Structure formats: structure tokens, C-alpha cells
Amino acid sequence: MKLLVSPINVEEAQIAVEGGADIIDVKNPREGSLGANFPWVIKSVRDAVKEPLSATIGDFNFRPGTASLAALGAAVSGADYIKIGLFDIQTREQAYKMAESVTKSVKEYDPNKKVVIAGYSDYKRINSISVFELPAVAGDVGADVVMMDTGIKDGSSTFEFLRDEEISEFVDLARQHGIQTALAGSLRFEDIDALNEINPDIIGVRGCVCGGDRSASIKLELVRELKNSLNGSQ
């Protein structure tokens, strides 16, 4: 299980790397759950770390053209993983068009880059498409990873919206479609046993390694503690 940590600048990225993070995920929490950071920030982090780099492009409504252009921008800026949140997407047809457009935009630029299609464990309260629809969508369009996050960052964990068995079902669905899984959404240290049991390919955190406040700074000792507690830690 790989650890993805979401810094907002170069300094935090370097702390995450020193703590053992496997993937560095550049985002901008001020613009939402999967808020996009600026191209020059992505580039500066790319120049500063050698680890795989992920970049979010936003929590989207149905704007496939805008999304595909944003995805290309993240890819050109140096991201290895390009992640989109299907926030205000209502139907499988909309989800397919969004995922297909983003994947085509990225893969035509560089087929080695990975596309992450993200949905939300609190999809009912944000009136979005069920996250359980997305493994099939992501697999059908040739994306690489399907992710579960929380759409509203109010401290509520993914584990408060879905039972462990439901989260395991999400992981199983993704594997049936030949793609990897990432779990995120205000994950806490007390969720580690369940995460190790469910065993997704990637877990994503920010608040957890900031001491519980995602607006605070990433703390080296918390990244190390989390990394050492996960299945397959080195």
C-alpha cells in the first residue's frame, strides 16, 4: 500500500518525502477537496523531488472541455498522476464523457502518465454520482486509478459515510476492471487497521499528517508514523 501525501508547496513536499511518502500530491485546499494548484507550483515541486508526482485539477461539474484542458496543463507541468474529481456529475453518461475526455487529453500527450478518476464517499450529501459507478467508468475509458475521497472537508471521514464492507466492495470492483484504487477523505490514524484490512493500492492524506487540521503544515514525525503503520511499509 503506497502513501500519497498532499503538500501545498515545495517545503511541505520535501517534508513528505523525508517522512517516506511514496507519491507527492500537489493540491490547493482553498479551492476544494481536490482543488487545483498553479502550474508553477507543480513545476517547482517536480524540480524539487524525484518521487512520483500527482496533481489535482479540481472538483468538476460537467465541463469535459475545461477538464481536458486542465488535465493537459497538469501533465505538461510535470505531474505523473493527473487527478479529477467528479463532484457535480449526475449520471454515468456524464461521468463517462468527463473521464474519457481527461484520459484522452493526458494519454495523447504521454501514454505513460496516469489518470485518476475520483468520486466521493459522501456522494449522497453532495448530490453526486455514486462512487460505486466509477470503477467501471474508469476501466472502460482506460484510466489507471479510481479514487474515493470526501467532497466536503468538515473533518468527517470516509469511514463515517460508508461501512468497511462497502469500501472493500469499491476496491474489489476496481480490481475486477483492472485498475488501481486510492482511498482518501479525512482519514485518521484510528482508521489504519481497517485500511490495512481493505488494502487499497494507495491511501491519500493531508489533515492526518498535519495533526488533524488540513490548513496547518505537514509534520515530519506524523508522515513517518503513518508510513510505518501501513501494509508493505519499507
Image: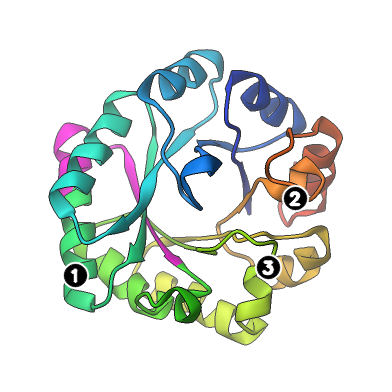
Q: Is residue 182 above or below residue 92?
A: above
Q: Are marks 1 and 2 in contact (CB under 8 Å)?
A: no
From the image, tell me which residue sits under label 3. 156
**Kind of residue sitting beneath label 1:** Gln
Quarter of the rendering containing residue 99? bottom left
Q: Secondary structure at mark 1?
A: helix
Q: Is residue 117 magenta?
A: yes
**Can residue 83 be spotted in the picture?**
no
Residue under label 2: 208
Label 2, residues with CA under 10 Å away: few <14, some 14-19, many ≥20: many
* CA–CA distance in space, label 1 to label 2: 32 Å
**Amino acid of disc 2:** Cys
For the magenta stretch, what is the residue range? 104-119
Q: Please tell me which residue is depicted at 57% across the width and 77% down the height of the picture.
A: 167
Disc number placed over residue 94 in the picture, else none: 1
Mark 2 lies on a secondary structure that is helix
Which residue shows up at 43% across the image and 70% down it?
175
User: Image height check: is 133 above or below 233?
Assistant: below
